[in-house]
């Protein structure tokens, strides 16, 4: 048997085998294929080693979409976090702290969510507590903590106040049992100084990774080969935005009209150009700074003096009062099937297809400039067509 074929078959077994029976199955398959048994001892050692490794899906994009055991292109980082959380504290009395550092919307919270859903983590910790970093330590009552092994996840959007951190860390140390761990989700590199372990860094996906992910999310390459080229071009124009990739790919899977998506591609290209001319940056970079993006290109035919500004998507929360702003779906925006009144409105951008099925919305404003050049947001009658 050719060595190359043996290796390919061997890899297939590794990916598809179940962890509990992987060792015995691998060994049986190796002998069935008449692999040279002169090194049988080494083969057995190798099989035992592989059986101890974590199983991986052979189709990572399916795992990203439908399961909670793998996040696309983040397997190494996930394993680093799990290794830290399961680390035996030994005789150390201090609570260990792991910083997770990355730019806005690179998937930090998604990654830690997948980690916390791992069966090993849920078995190891008695409770998992999520804390908003904007909350002062004074608002975090001792009742939130229990004298048991606890995992505390705290996200910081800006800098960390030294006194607040000292108080928070002291509270955690006093009110949790040994073996408790703290994970801080941050954007600023300098804040890694609060960690007791080497920080885990999450960078944006490379263009190759992003393009691959987008195509796998968006279309079946075998059934719709013509869409692959369009998806490739869209992946380049989107500039690496993960949430936009999910928003667009969800629509692509429902609509395989090539001509429709070629029109959408041209609108995206014009929108990117408009934002470069107006702000000097790609919309993705503007979104990462939590600033308004000019999305006029995707709205219905307004006079040239109209401008539509959209805020970056945010998680829809039930505890925020609803002021009954007009609302439209992202699908309606893309299809230009609805006319927007002047003033403020909401765009329902996307709903995640994996737990916890997070919903994202964006606040938007339609601005109109009158003949004198002044800006107004006076509402216009909404089109019923």
Image (tube, helix red, strand yellow):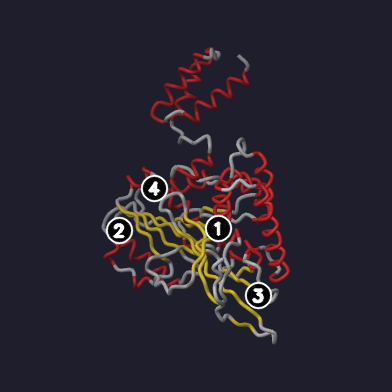
**Residue 67 image position (x, y, % from top left):** 44, 43
Q: Residues within 10 Å of mark 4 (few under 14, many from 20)?
A: few
Q: Earlier in the sequence, mark 2 or mark 1?
A: 2
Q: Locate the N terminus and report the quarter of the image it occupies.
A: top right
Q: Secondary structure at mark 1?
A: helix
Vertical comparison of 12 with 134: above or below: above
Residue bearing the label numbered 4: 117
Vertical comparison of 20 with 193: above or below: above
Residue bearing the label numbered 3: 306
Relative depth, front residue between 170 and 44: 44
Q: Are marks 3 and 2 in contact (CB under 8 Å)?
A: no
Q: Earlier in the sequence, mark 4 or mark 3?
A: 4
Residue bearing the label numbered 2: 176
Q: CA distance from mark 3 to mark 2?
A: 56 Å
Relative depth, front residue between 272 and 40: 272
**Residue 379 is drawn in which quadrant?**
bottom right
Q: Nearer the viewer, mark 3 or mark 2?
A: 3
Q: Residues within 10 Å of mark 1 (few under 14, many from 20)?
A: some
Residue placed at 50% from the left, 57% from the top? 350
Q: Residue 321: which disc?
A: none
Q: Earlier in the sequence, mark 3 or mark 1?
A: 3
Residue bearing the label numbered 1: 331
**Residue 107 image position (x, y, % from top left):** 52, 54
């Amino acid at each position: 048997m050719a060595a190359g074929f043996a290796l390919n078959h061997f890899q297939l077994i590794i990916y598809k085998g179940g962890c509990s029976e992987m060792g015995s199955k691998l060994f049986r398959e190796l002998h069935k294929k008449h692999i040279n048994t002169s090194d049988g001892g080494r083969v057995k050692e190798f099989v035992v080693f592989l059986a101890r490794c974590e199983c991986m899906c052979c189709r990572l994009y399916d795992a990203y979409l439908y399961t909670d055991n793998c996040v696309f292109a983040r397997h190494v980082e996930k394993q680093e976090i799990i290794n830290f959380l399961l680390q035996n504290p030994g005789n150390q009395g201090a609570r260990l702290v792991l910083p997770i550092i990355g730019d806005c919307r690179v998937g930090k919270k998604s990654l830690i969510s997948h980690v916390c859903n791992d069966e090993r983590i849920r078995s190891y910790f008695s409770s998992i507590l999520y804390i908003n970093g904007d909350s002062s330590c004074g608002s975090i009552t001792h009742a939130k903590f229990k004298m048991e092994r606890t995992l505390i996840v705290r996200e910081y959007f800006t800098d960390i106040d030294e006194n607040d951190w000292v108080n928070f860390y002291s509270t955690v140390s006093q009110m949790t049992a040994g073996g408790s761990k703290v994970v801080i989700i941050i954007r600023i590199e300098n804040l890694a100084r609060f960690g007791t372990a080497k920080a885990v860094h999450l960078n944006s996906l490379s263009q190759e990774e992003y393009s691959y992910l987008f195509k796998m999310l968006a279309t079946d390459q075998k059934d719709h080969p013509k869409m692959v080229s369009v998806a490739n071009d869209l992946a380049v124009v989107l500039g690496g935005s993960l949430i936009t990739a999910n928003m667009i790919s969800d629509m692509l899977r429902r609509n395989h009209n090539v001509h429709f998506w070629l029109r959408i591609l041209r609108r995206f290209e014009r929108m990117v150009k408009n934002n470069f001319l107006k702000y000097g940056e790609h919309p993705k970079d503007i979104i990462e700074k939590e600033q308004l993006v000019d999305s006029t290109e995707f709205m219905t035919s307004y006079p040239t003096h109209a401008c539509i500004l959209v805020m970056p998507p945010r998680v829809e929360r039930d505890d925020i009062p609803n002021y009954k702003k007009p609302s439209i779906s992202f699908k309606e925006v893309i299809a230009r099937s609805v006319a927007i009144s002047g003033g403020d409105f909401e765009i329902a951008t996307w709903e995640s297809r994996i737990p916890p099925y997070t919903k994202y919305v964006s606040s938007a404003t339609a601005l109109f400039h009158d003949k004198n050049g002044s800006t107004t947001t006076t509402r216009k009658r909404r089109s019923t067509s």
